[in-house]
């Protein structure tokens, strides 16, 4: 079924849906429309119903600075915490953030193998690896995230 998502949710009988799922849509919306989507979903969902919104992960520098902008229809990245707040304000609880699609190990920063290193170099190599882990998580992390939110029961 094709149509306007806002109109479809507005036309839905209040409290009649068990779930609303949107995959890679919200990054195409202005901020005011994102809040509107969350509120319309809350209206359409029955108590205990679930809202799932998946979008690129702006906490990954590689996603935020490079891959997000490959799609010219993307308007803005959506921060997980701002989406969590929007869901809570619309009456969802709990609101869980799930990280999705980690980058392949081959695409990430390499780790120094401690095997075969002289004992006096292992401590330094281990420290470099721990620093690499922190930098790797910042640069790459996961490519997407999803918010999974449940509508509160009255």
Image (cartoon, rainbow, N blue to C red):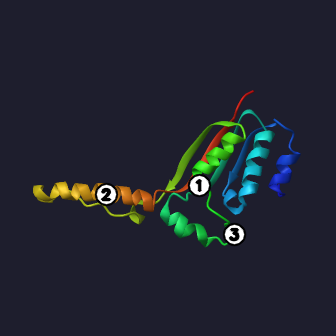
Label number found at residue 73: 3
Q: What is the crowding at mark 3: few (fewer than 14 residues within 10 Å), some, or many (at least 20)?
A: few
Front disc: 2 or 3: 2
Quadrant in the rendering for residue 46: top right
Disc 2 from disc 3: Cα separation: 36 Å
Residue 126 appears anywhere in the view: yes
Quarter placement of the N terminus: bottom right
Question: Residue 96: image x %, image y %?
Answer: 58, 41
Question: Residue 135: image x %, image y %?
Answer: 38, 60
Front disc: 3 or 1: 1
N-terminal of the two: label 3 or label 1?
3
* Residue located 62% across and 45% down the image: 84
Q: What is the crowding at mark 2: few (fewer than 14 residues within 10 Å), some, or many (at least 20)?
A: few
Label number found at residue 131: 2
Q: Which residue has dot 1 on it?
A: 79
Quarter placement of the C terminus: top right
């Amino acid at each position: 079924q094709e149509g306007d998502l806002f109109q479809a949710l507005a036309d839905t009988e209040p409290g009649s849906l068990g779930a609303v799922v949107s995959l890679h849509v919200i990054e195409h919306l202005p901020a005011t429309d994102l809040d509107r989507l969350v509120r319309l979903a809350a209206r359409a969902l029955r108590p205990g119903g679930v809202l799932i919104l998946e979008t690129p992960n702006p906490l990954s520098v590689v996603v935020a600075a490079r891959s997000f902008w490959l799609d010219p229809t993307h308007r803005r990245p959506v921060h997980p915490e701002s989406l969590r707040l929007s869901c809570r304000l619309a009456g969802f609880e709990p609101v869980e953030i799930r990280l999705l699609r980690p980058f392949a190990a081959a695409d990430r920063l390499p780790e120094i193998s401690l095997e075969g290193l002289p004992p006096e170099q292992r401590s330094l190599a281990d420290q470099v690896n721990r620093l690499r882990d922190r930098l790797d998580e910042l640069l790459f992390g996961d490519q997407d995230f999803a918010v999974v939110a449940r509508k509160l029961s009255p």
